């Protein structure tokens, strides 16, 4: 893409923990060109094999708070005692490089980005039901029982925000979901180009349209019912 006065498409992807978001994002980045990934900053300690600059930028609390004072974040939040945030520099770098920007953030961060960047394309990834999500969380073997239960409660809370997103992707079969996510990203690019769509692009847009919020409401009913998500005031989501 030409970097001359390029305005990046910002893609927001959110999902409850255990929905397969990280796998989908990694596969998307492998298969779609001119797409930069924004790595969040956090004050929490690295887990397992996590390394600085790969999963997160790990910084101290004073460093993070200085970045807040210097207005370096597009969005940030404090979650369970730790800060998480998306640095503005990633958007500037995408503009300079003539590339689009992918943000992997929770519903709280997404709301901040949507307020600041109303033209952003938002995608919410859902598990097929609560039972599947619980099985995936247990299979990961990363969390104790208390954390798993907390993540399930948080998932119910997050899912209530689904209607704030442009697209809803139910991650039932991984290979299909990877292809659908790719179609959503490429469709948005084609539609915003302002030129007539090719036959291939029309087909891509048709796949993406199937995931638009207005077109998935009926499919979502049993998923939402499986979570039976209560309204929990003041809830925020772990990243």
Image: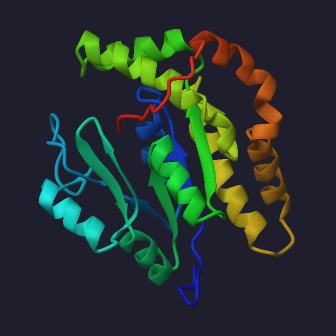
Residue 197, position as x, y percentages in the image = 84, 66
Residue at horizontal 45 percent and vertical 72 percent from the top? 91
Residue 133, position as x, y percentages in the image = 47, 17
The answer to whether residue 28 shows anywhere in this view is yes
Q: Nearer the viewer, residue 63 or 222?
A: 63
Residue 208, position as x, y percentages in the image = 74, 46
Q: Left of 130 or right of it: where is 146?
A: left
Residue at horizontal 58 percent and vertical 88 percent from the top? 5
Q: Left of 11 or right of it: where is 56?
A: left
Q: Is residue 35 above or below residue 203?
A: below
Q: Quadrant of the N terminus?
A: bottom right
Q: Is residue 184 above or below residue 139?
A: below
Q: Quadrant of residue 10?
A: bottom right
Q: Nearer the viewer, residue 232 or 55?
A: 232
Q: Quadrant of the C terminus?
A: top left
The answer to whether residue 39 shows anywhere in this view is no
Residue at horizontal 62 percent and vertical 61 percent from the top? 120
Residue at horizontal 23 percent and vertical 14 percent from the top? 144
Q: Is residue 95 above or below residue 230?
A: below
Residue 136, position as x, y percentages in the image = 41, 17
């Amino acid at each position: 893409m030409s970097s001359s006065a390029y305005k990046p498409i910002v893609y927001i992807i959110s999902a409850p923990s255990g929905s397969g978001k990280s796998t989908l994002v990694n596969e998307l980045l492998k298969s779609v060109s001119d797409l930069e990934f924004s790595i969040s900053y956090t004050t929490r300690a690295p887990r397992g094999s996590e390394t600085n600059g790969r999963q997160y930028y790990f910084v101290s609390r004073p460093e993070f708070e200085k970045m807040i004072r210097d207005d370096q974040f597009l969005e940030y939040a404090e979650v369970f005692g730790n800060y998480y945030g998306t640095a503005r520099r990633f958007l500037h770098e995408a503009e300079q490089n003539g590339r689009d920007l992918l943000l992997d953030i929770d519903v709280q961060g997404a709301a901040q980005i949507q307020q600041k960047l109303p033209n952003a394309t938002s995608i919410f990834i859902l598990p097929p039901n609560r039972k599947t999500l619980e099985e995936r969380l247990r299979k990961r073997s990363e969390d104790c029982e208390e954390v798993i239960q907390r993540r399930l409660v948080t998932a119910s809370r997050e899912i209530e925000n689904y209607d704030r997103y442009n697209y809803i992707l139910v991650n039932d079969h991984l290979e299909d979901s990877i292809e659908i996510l790719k179609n959503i990203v490429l469709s948005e690019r084609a539609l915003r180009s302002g030129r007539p769509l090719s036959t291939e692009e029309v087909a891509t847009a048709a796949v993406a349209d199937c995931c638009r919020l207005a077109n998935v409401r009926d499919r979502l009913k049993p998923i939402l019912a499986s979570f039976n998500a209560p309204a929990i005031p003041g809830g925020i989501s772990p990243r």
